[in-house]
Image (tube, coloured by chain):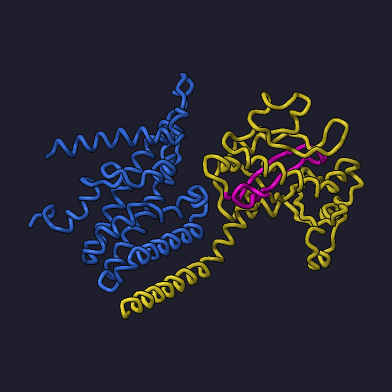
Chain colours: A blue, B yellow
Amino acid sequence: MKLTRTKAFKTFAGPAWYENPINMQMLGICSALAVTVQLKTAFVMTLAMTFVVSMSNLIISLLRNVIPGNIRIIVELAVIASLVILADEFLRAYYFEISKLLSVFVGLIITNCIILGRAEGFALSNPPHLAFIDGLGNGVGYGSVLMSVALIRELFGSGSIFGYTVVPERLYAAGYEDMGLMLLAPAAFIIIGLMAWLQKYLVNSRK
Amino acid sequence: MSETIKSISFALGMCLVCGILLTAAATGLQPRQEKNRLSDRQKNVLYTVDLASRDKTYTPEQIRDIYEKNIDEIRVSAAGEIAEPAEDRAGQDGQVLTIYLYTKNGEIQNYIIPIESQGLWGKIYGYMALENDGSTVAGFTVYEHSETPGLGGEIEKQWFQENFEGKKIVDRTGGFVAVQIAKGDVDKRVPEEKEPHYVDGISGATLTGRYLSEGLEKTLARYEPVSLCFRKQRLSCRLQEPTDSGEK
């Protein structure tokens, strides 16, 4: 069987591309606006988010047969919130500078609708390994959009990539200026809008 | 009925597991977090007197070295006298003031006071450095706050903090006025004779500005005896003593 035909691959590729949480489902937009001014913060946010969504999918899938139906949302939220706090504490201990830059947005992963959506929509009805892969796929799908937006914003807004200046001095001397708009939230709206348009076009033209 | 009991016991078990896990993580990581926080505070002290640049990154060891070489932390009583360490431990809150001295070539360049202010959503913590003339602000930083990112959260940004440099906490006749945050741009909103005592405000964060103005005024008023000491007669100021003996 070809790799691309396996169920695991489909579970991964679905959320990563065809059903991309941001571009195709328009979920998790709030954090995508907030943390994409720099690649560094977008990258850490991607890691934190991928960790939380895949682990919460795994744990909830493992528990799916014992969770009482009437309190399942509360249980899901308890799992997600605990994981987010773990991620936040870890960042504060080992990557203090970045955790200061991300400020409240790590904590706000709890309210990211992608995670609860996947827990409720996928993990509750699928075996653990698929749920975990689905979480990874969503993390990658979310993260790839985040990183692309951050790349554009940092390159044109501050003339750097991962904090290293890439726009040469000569260009500035010749009259080039960084785009102030890129540093503001509306720029992320515009970029995400254009990317959603592009991706929908690409996905639909394949069909 | 048994369904309900099952739900409740599951919820209780869940709470227990999550609680233990989070407590373990929080206590286990606390020493590291404390170290980070201390280093961050020291770095902010250095920012106010330009011993560290906001554009560069430093390791915690570098920060500690620069800090220990240049900054002395002393405590003074509310009247401006140097407090003995024993007095400090007596824990008379509000009676003992902490100040940080930046000494270069045996002379105090700046004194730095810790800022603790009310904010819109929580406390704002920072530092303000004053020149040794006792009236000019040399630098200002905020290292902890819970203001809204993008609005009140702008107080942690360089452009806002740099506005404070060179502002005066006394008016021309020598009376104490503190530094206020204007509602909007200083050159448009504030009469010219008051401009040295105002910094540009943040649009969309009027309340944060108001709270921080109050906090700054309160803190500066508490430290007024120290400032007065610097303003009046720098050389005979008792604050000089520990550093003098330290130099010899």
Q: Quadrant of residue B31?
A: bottom right
Q: Is residue B150 left or right of residue A28?
A: right
Residue A122, image x, y percentages: 24, 59
Q: Quadrant of residue B152?
A: top right
Most frequent secondary structure within the magenta stretch: strand
Residue B89, image x, y percentages: 78, 67
Q: Is residue A160 left or right of residue B66?
A: left
* Range of magenta residues: B118-146
How many circles with numbers are drawn on the protein?
A: 0
Q: Residue at x 41, y 74 (%)?
A: B17
Q: Is residue A145 magenta?
A: no
User: Looking at the rendering, in which quadrant would you find the C terminus of chain A?
Assistant: top left
Residue B63, image x, y percentages: 62, 52
Task: Tell which of A4 and B9 is nearer to you.
Answer: B9
Residue B213, image x, y percentages: 70, 41
Q: Is residue B125 above or below residue B24?
A: above
Q: Residue at x 75, y 30 (%)?
A: B196
Q: Quadrant of residue A198?
A: top left
Q: Residue at x 37, y 50 (%)?
A: A46
Q: Is residue B26 above or below residue B67?
A: below
User: Looking at the rendering, in which quadrant would you find the N terminus of chain A?
Assistant: bottom left
